[in-house]
Image: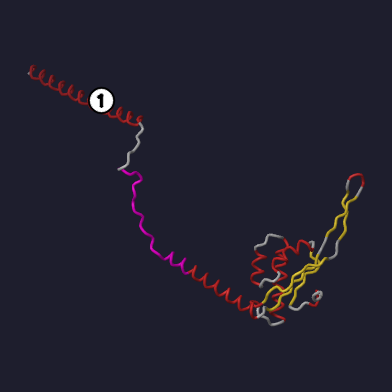
C-alpha cells in the first residue's frame, strides 16, 4: 500500500522549482529537518554548512509564511510534515577531450518542496513543556550571570613569591661577585682615608713653615 501522492499530501507547502542543484544533494539536507518542529528545523539549517541549507531555509520560511497568512495557523505549532526534492530538467553540455573527442557534462536541477502542518495535541503539549523548561533554564543562567557581575571583587592579598622558611639555592658565582664588590668598596674607603690623612699632614707642615717665617 502506497502513501498519498506528492501533490495530495495535507498541509501548507512551498515549492522552489528549477534550482540548479542535483536532487541527491538537496535530499541530504532535507532528511535532517523532516519531522522536526519549525523552530528546531530552522536551527538545524542555520548550523549546516552545505549549500542547499540556505536555499531550503528560505523555502521553509516561505511555507511557514503561507501557513500563517493563508491558513491562519500559529507558527509555533507547526512542524515539517514532508520535505522532498524531485529531479528537474538536465541540461546537456560537452567538453573537448583528447584526440578530437567530446565528454558529456550534465547540469542537473531539482524541485524542492517543504510542507508544514500543525502538531497534534500530545506532541504540542510535550513541545510546550520542553520550551518552558528551556526558558526557565535560560532565565536562571541569566540571573546567575548578573549576580556574579554584581558581586564585589575581593582585594588580592600580597603573597611572597619565595618562602623564607625554605632553603634558597644561591649561585656561587653571585657570592664571589658580591665579595669582590665589597672588597672594592673597602679598598676605595681605605684610599679615601689615606688621602684625607695626607691632606691633613700637608696642612700641618704648611702651618709650621708659616710660623717659622714669622
In the image, what residue occupies the spot 10% across and 19% down? Answer: 208
- In front of the other: 150 or 47: 47
Query: Dot 1: what SS?
Result: helix
Tell whether 133 sits left or right of 105: left
Magenta span: chief secondary structure? loop
**Can you give x and y, in whole percent of width and height, for residue 175 in the image?**
32, 31
Write down the residue under mark 1: 187
| Residue 63 magenta | no
Q: Is residue 18 above or below residue 11?
A: above
Q: Quadrant of residue 211?
A: top left
Tell whether 67 sits left or right of 172: right
Quadrant into which the C terminus falls: top left
**Can you give x and y, in whole percent of width and height, for residue 213 in the image?**
9, 17
Question: How many labels sit on residues?
Answer: 1
Q: Quadrant of residue 169?
A: top left
**Can you give x and y, in whole percent of width and height, for residue 4 in the image?**
80, 76
* Region of the chain picked out in magenta, as a range: 143-164
In the image, what residue occupies the spot 45% across and 67% down? Answer: 146
Q: Is residue 207 above or below residue 114?
A: above
**Can you give x and y, in whole percent of width and height, for residue 83 in the image?**
74, 70
Q: Is residue 201 above or below residue 86?
A: above
Q: Quadrant of residue 17?
A: bottom right
Amino acid at each position: 500500500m502506497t502513501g498519498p501522492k506528492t501533490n495530495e499530501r495535507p498541509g501548507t507547502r512551498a515549492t522552489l522549482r528549477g534550482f540548479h542543484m542535483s536532487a541527491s544533494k538537496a535530499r541530504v539536507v532535507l532528511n535532517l529537518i523532516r519531522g522536526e518542529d519549525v523552530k528546531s528545523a530552522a536551527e538545524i539549517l542555520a548550523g549546516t554548512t552545505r549549500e542547499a541549507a540556505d536555499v531550503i531555509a528560505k523555502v521553509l520560511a516561505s511555507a511557514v509564511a503561507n501557513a500563517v497568512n493563508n491558513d491562519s495557523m500559529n507558527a509555533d505549532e507547526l512542524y515539517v510534515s514532508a520535505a522532498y526534492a524531485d529531479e528537474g530538467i538536465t541540461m546537456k553540455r560537452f567538453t573537448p577531450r583528447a584526440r578530437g573527442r567530446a565528454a558529456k557534462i550534465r547540469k542537473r536541477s531539482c524541485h524542492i518542496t517543504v510542507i508544514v502542518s500543525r502538531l497534534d495535541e500530545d506532541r504540542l503539549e510535550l513541545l510546550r513543556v520542553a520550551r518552558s523548561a528551556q526558558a526557565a533554564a535560560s532565565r536562571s543562567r541569566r540571573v546567575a550571570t548578573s549576580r556574579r557581575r554584581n558581586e564585589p571583587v575581593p582585594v588580592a592579598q600580597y603573597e611572597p613569591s619565595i618562602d623564607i622558611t625554605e632553603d634558597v639555592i644561591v649561585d656561587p658565582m653571585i657570592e664571589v661577585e658580591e665579595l669582590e664588590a665589597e672588597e672594592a668598596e673597602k679598598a676605595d674607603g681605605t684610599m679615601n682615608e689615606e688621602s684625607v690623612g695626607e691632606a691633613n699632614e700637608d696642612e700641618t707642615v704648611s702651618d709650621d713653615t708659616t710660623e717659622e717665617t714669622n
